Amino acid sequence: MLEGDIHPDYADVASTLIRQIPAHNHAGCAACVYHRGRKVVDIWGGTRDSAGNPWVEDTTAPSFSTTKGVISTLMHILVDQGKADYDDPIAEHWPEFGARGKDRITIRQAMCHEAGLYRVSEMVSNPQEMLDWQHMLNVVADAEPAHQPGEGSGYHALTYGWVMGGLIEAIGGKTLEAVLQEELVDPLGLDGMFIGMPHNELYRRAELINGVSRPAADREGWQANLAEWTESMLEMVGVRLAEFRSALQPFNEDFDWNSEAVVQAKIPAANGQFTARSLARMYAMIAGGGEIDGVRLLSQERVRQLSVIQNRGRDRVLFLPMNWRLGYHRAFTFGVSAPNAFGHYGYGGSGAFCDPSRQLAVALTLNSGAGTPTGDSRMLRIARASIKAVDRLRQ
């Protein structure tokens, strides 16, 4: 059922992936693992679309919030080049961003989700607006923070991409696509890493099985009363579902993530198209202290800085302590301890992370589309199998 290569010591990763391929619909996935700078797992299987075409070596998959880890890494590269500092106000590089009291919001605050700019449902009236890059840059530049910046984190589920993407363009002096290609893709020789997929690459993409975001269904009678009572009870313990909806549900009409218009748009917090191989290699560079195969993109000191936990409180949107680093959250796992691991997972189950203490990098891409805003159990199981394999070798 699987193709590719795997070192025998990591056989459990393959058996875990096999169990994750749905038997009764057209779905597939890919996993890649690096250890000590060496690729030890590179496997894939299943189907990539409703026509039943097989998942092949160069298939890319829409990876939702896993994209945030990529643009965060790109930002770190620019900082390491001396083009910015984490404590710079964003408006210093992007003057328009300083509107409505945002002139003091720093790059650091934005990267650890403390800017208060997560309420996308208040910024757009129609989800189709998200396809217009310049429009969305103008929207976030003109937005007003939901709370005092720096006072706790609130997951910028969609807006993170426009805040960081606009900043990267302002600092890099080029389009986001050009900066990504020149500073990350080309130096590492990545075979599939797109934010806004070129038309001539569309043939490679996997199709999401459940690829349409729909408006929330109307509730009436007892259902509405129960929902109101539930929300009021949750608010008593500090959980405000309204914040979750404001950050993640701007969909007042159907929005098809599989459409060519969406795949080719720039939505850098949500529509990255990646191979697991490219994600794993990027994180392997970080796990290796900023270098892989003789190519250094980050200094060792930069890697140390980006891995420092910035806040440990409960996130206002996700309701969990995410242990935000600069653009990454803690790597969630099942049954193993990985306190030094970080990366980013996404809706639909994709994810990628590194653990510098183990010199480990792991990535999973798929197209079966389900779960929470930061994925589901599939990435956690791949993480567990990979970590256990490494730990057995260290004994």
Image: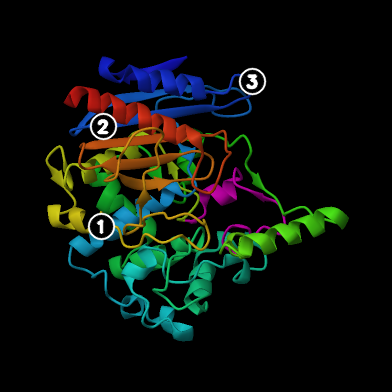
The C terminus, quarter of image: top left
Q: Residue at x 37, y 41 (%)?
A: 352
Q: Residue 24: give its label.
A: 3
Q: Position of residue 244 (x, y in %)?
A: 59, 59
Q: Amino acid at mark 2?
A: Tyr
How many angstroms separate mark 2 from mark 3 (CA)?
Answer: 31 Å
The quarter of the picture where residue 381 lies is top left
- In the image, the segment drawn in magenta is 246-267
Q: Residue at x 43, y 17 (%)?
A: 2
Crowding near the residue tagged with mark 3, few <14, some 14–19, many ≥20 C-alpha atoms within 10 Å? few
How many angstroms separate mark 1 from mark 3 (CA)?
Answer: 43 Å
How many angstroms separate mark 1 from mark 2 (CA)?
Answer: 22 Å
Q: Residue at x 33, y 70 (%)?
A: 107
Residue located beneath label 1 in the image = 308
Q: Left or right: 346 with respect to 222?
A: left
Would residue 169 be visible to someone looking at this image? no
Q: Earlier in the sequence, mark 1 or mark 2?
A: 2
Within the magenta stretch, is there residue 58? no
Crowding near the residue tagged with mark 2, few <14, some 14–19, many ≥20 C-alpha atoms within 10 Å? many
Query: Which one is nearer the viewer's eye here, 62 or 69?
Result: 69
Q: Are marks 1 and 3 in contact (CB under 8 Å)?
A: no
Q: Position of residue 183 (x, y in %)?
A: 26, 53
Q: Position of residue 268 (x, y in %)?
A: 45, 56
Within the magenta stretch, is there residue 247? yes
Q: Residue 349: give its label.
A: none
Q: Amino acid at mark 3?
A: His
Residue located beneath label 2 in the image = 34
Query: Which one is nearer the viewer's eye here, 253 or 247?
Result: 247
Task: Determine whether the residue tagged by mark 1 lies in a helix, strand or loop.
Answer: loop
Would residue 85 be visible to someone looking at this image? yes
Q: Earlier in the sequence, mark 2 or mark 3?
A: 3
